[in-house]
Image: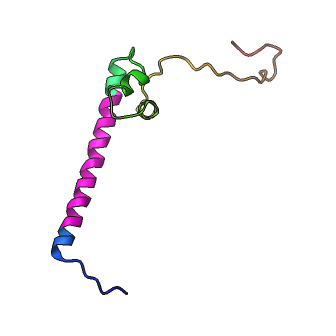
């Protein structure tokens, strides 16, 4: 058991930090939503281009796009190497 009891000033400072952290979380969520809106409104802009002027790395911009269902810039290039079952046809290219 500790004998330390925080002073009123320390308790108020802790409360102020907690409130600031909550506000920061709200501001970050708002920023992520605004970035997603911009990516949707400007489909020609790539994640890399956006990351060059935002406080986010390219991968973070990509994760924001995924989180907010921003349409992809190009179709996926990966396809299955397994042949389709019940047919002799090859998978579509």
Q: Which image quadrant for residue 20?
A: bottom left
Residue 68 part of the magenta segment: no
> Residue 10 placed where, x, y %?
20, 71
At which x and y percent is residue 24? 27, 48
Asked if residue 90 lies left or right of residue 26, the reply is right
Residue 35: x and y, percent?
Answer: 33, 30
Q: Is residue 30 shown in magenta? A: yes
Tell me where the magenta segment starts and ends, as one range: 13-36
Q: Main secondary structure of the magenta part?
A: helix
- The quadrant of the image that shows the C terminus is top right
Q: Is residue 92 left or right of residue 57?
A: right
On the rendered image, what quadrant is the N terminus found in? bottom left
Q: Nearer the viewer, residue 92 or 47?
A: 47
Labels in figure, total: 0
Question: Image point 39% across, 21% down: which residue?
Answer: 49
Spot occupied by residue 55 in the image (x, y as percentages of width and height): 33, 34
Q: Which quadrant of the structure image shows residue 27?
A: top left
- Which residue lies at the image location 24% right of the left edge and 50% below the top edge? 23
Q: Is residue 27 left or right of residue 66?
A: left
Q: Is residue 20 above or below residue 80?
A: below
Identity of the residue drawn at 32% across and 41% down? 29
Question: 29 or 86, which is in the foreground?
Answer: 29
Chosen colour scheme: rainbow
């Amino acid at each position: 058991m500790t004998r330390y009891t925080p002073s009123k000033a320390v308790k108020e400072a802790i409360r102020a930090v907690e409130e600031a952290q909550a506000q920061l979380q709200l501001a970050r969520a708002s920023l992520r939503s605004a970035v997603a809106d911009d990516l949707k409104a400007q489909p020609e802009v790539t994640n890399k281009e956006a990351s060059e002027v935002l406080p986010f790395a390219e991968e973070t911009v990509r994760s924001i796009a995924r989180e907010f269902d921003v349409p992809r810039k190009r179709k996926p290039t990966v396809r299955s190497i397994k042949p389709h079952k019940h047919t002799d046809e090859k998978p579509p290219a």
